[in-house]
Amino acid sequence: MKNGAPASRRPVPPASQAGATTAARIQFQLARLGWPGALGAVLLLAALAADPLLVAPLEARLADAQSVAASRALLPTPAERQKKPLAVPRERVETALPRLFLAARHHGLSLDEGRYAETGKPGESQSLRIDLPVIAPYPTLRAFLAEVLDDNPALRLESLELRRDDIAATELDARLRFVLNLETAR
């Protein structure tokens, strides 16, 4: 402001010139960045465009796979477990054990040796303790345990001991201890 005169202002460009001005500014900034900056900007725009096209379907497939894996790992609901007996009559112990060995064979496990011991006193709750050494990969062990425990609710896994001698080994030395609940004599 000189001598009370108003300061000169830039004239406001019409709307058609505003788009051209913006385009000119973008060109100027890209020229300043050079070809590496222009390549980076193009790659950034390509990544933003590819995200909904590539990543969203992959995330959906991953969510589906995770839900299938989670449903395989889940135990039956309490309502489903109540339909099955939680104890085996003494007379049917001979039918419960072969199902255990059949599941092992189904998963390619060898149960060559095992220790069996009855626990409890007559007239009280009794059970049959089954100790089994197994050598197998972890996914196979997990699938075997899921099948056996789902198939027979009277059988419970009391302990699971895993050992691997070498970190690169895929096979685990496992010691499984099951307890088969027996019905008390009345």
Image: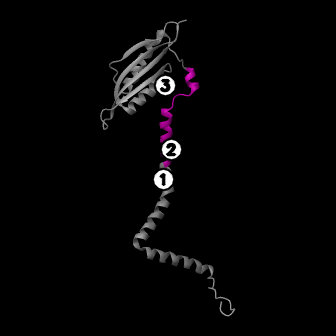
Disc assigned to residue 164: none
Q: CA distance from mark 3 to mark 1?
A: 36 Å
Percent coordinates x, y for residue 80 in the rendering: 56, 25
Give the answer, above or below, for where 139 lies relative to 92.
below
Q: Earlier in the sequence, mark 3 or mark 2?
A: 2
Query: Does the segment drawn in magenta span residue 23?
Result: no
Percent coordinates x, y for residue 62 in the rendering: 48, 45
Give the answer, above or below, for where 33 lies relative to 13.
above
Say which residue appears at 47% left-offset and 14% top-offset: 127
Q: Amino acid at mark 3?
A: Asp
Q: Which element is circle 1 on?
A: helix
Q: CA distance from mark 3 to mark 2?
A: 25 Å
Disc assigned to residue 63: 2
Give the answer, above or below, for where 39 lies relative to 4.
above
Secondary structure mainly formed by the magenta segment: helix
Tell me where residue 35 sits by quadrant. bottom left
Q: Which element is circle 2 on?
A: helix
Disc assigned to residue 150: 3
Contact, mark 3 vs mark 1 (Cβ under 8 Å): no
Disc assigned to residue 55: 1
- Give the residues drawn in magenta, as a range: 59-83
Q: Earlier in the sequence, mark 1 or mark 2?
A: 1
